[in-house]
Image: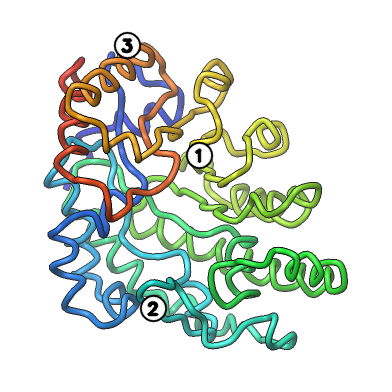
Amino acid sequence: MTLKNRIFLDALKRENNQEYVPVWLLRQAGRYLPEYMKIRSQYSDFFQMIKKPEVCKELTLQPLQRYPLDAAITFTDILTIPDAMGVPVEFISGKGPVFGNSIRNDNALKLNPDGALKKLDYVFEATSLIKANITVPLIGFTGSPWTLFVYLFYGESPKNHNELNNYLENNLPIAHSYLEQLTEIIKDYISTQIEAGADCIQIFDSWGGLLDEKYEELSLNYINQIASSVQNDIPVILYTRDKLIDEIINSTPIKCFNLDSSDEIDKHIDKKIAVQGNFNPKNFHADKEELKQMAQLVHTKYKDRKNYIFNLGSGLTPDINPDKVGYFLNELSSFGSK
């Protein structure tokens, strides 16, 4: 389909000249939607489901059919890359992703890049299918090398951070070797997503907040290599959880940032960057009158801002009522016109 709504891309380039706030949401497709759960119930394994391009297309389109959104994001997962590199991952109910092996249990754990990109064809096929069925921009995405390394180290979501710190103290060159391998395949991964139809790329540095003084060395350095490999006309957005972007802005070529709920939009709105995020999804638990007031406040504050996109500081969770999300977004959309 033809791209009819460019307001999201315009805002990423700091060129939104309309009195309308563009919108998309972290995890806008997912477990809070009953139509998603209906499909999810048909698969015992999450990865089995996301390896079906037609299903990913349908899941990606679900929130666009419900809400006035200005972008779609391919329904897939950041852990597709380790899986393709020979470290299988399984999603266990109540626990999340669990790898078949981990660096902390096997310091000689090998990542196999041979044929890995081919194993990710299902992502690229889904990207093309989605692109053919939408009139808004499509966001492709990846986990950062550091975030993927953290999952590979623990074999699951991290808990004991001292264990990782001790490993880095004694095995820093090995850690860099893993990060370099992940960086190279991520470059190819996002390049192929763009070829398949992605209009921009978001990098999720979900575990960036685990790093303090070594953040630039172990995370941002590799993110910058990835961002610099992307063609100039494709915007790159960075989301780093538990890390204020003041620490990052002047050390990266990236000019678009998704803030988590601990940062503040107003601290950055006047800078030469595009900003999105920060809105706490727990706000959707408010009653309708409060939601209406919040929507009006967002519009009033940011309707004239060329570089602002409404989004969340973290993803939508199963406890969120999709009807309340819809009420808020319809109220926000009712102000101004595209």
Q: Element type at marker 1?
A: loop
- 295 relative to 81 in the view: left or right: left
For image coordinates 54% across by 35% down, the residue present is 262
Label 3 is placed on what type of residue?
Answer: Thr
Q: Residue furthest right?
A: 170
Instruction: Specify few, some or many for label 1: CA neighbours under 10 Å numbering under 14, 14-19, or 20 or more.
Output: many
The answer to which of 77 and 201 lies nearer the viewer is: 77
On the image, which quarter does residue 170 sit in?
bottom right
**In the image, which is nearer the foreground, mark 2 or mark 1?**
2
The residue at 60%/67% (across/down) is 158
Real-space Cα separation, disc 2 to disc 1, in angstroms: 26 Å
Identify the amino acid type marked 2: Ile
What residue would you read off at disc 3?
Answer: 300
Indicate the colouring scheme: rainbow
* Residue highlighted by disc 1: 260
Viewer-side residue, 77 vs 16? 77
Disc 1/disc 3 C-alpha distance (Å):
21 Å
Amino acid, disc 1: Asp
Residue 336 drawn above or below residue 284: above
Q: Is 257 drawn above or below residue 163 in the view shown?
A: above
Q: Earlier in the sequence, mark 2 or mark 3?
A: 2
Residue 110 screen position, x and y as percent = 66, 86
Q: Kindly report which numbered mark, 2 or 3, lies closer to the viewer in this rendering.
A: 2
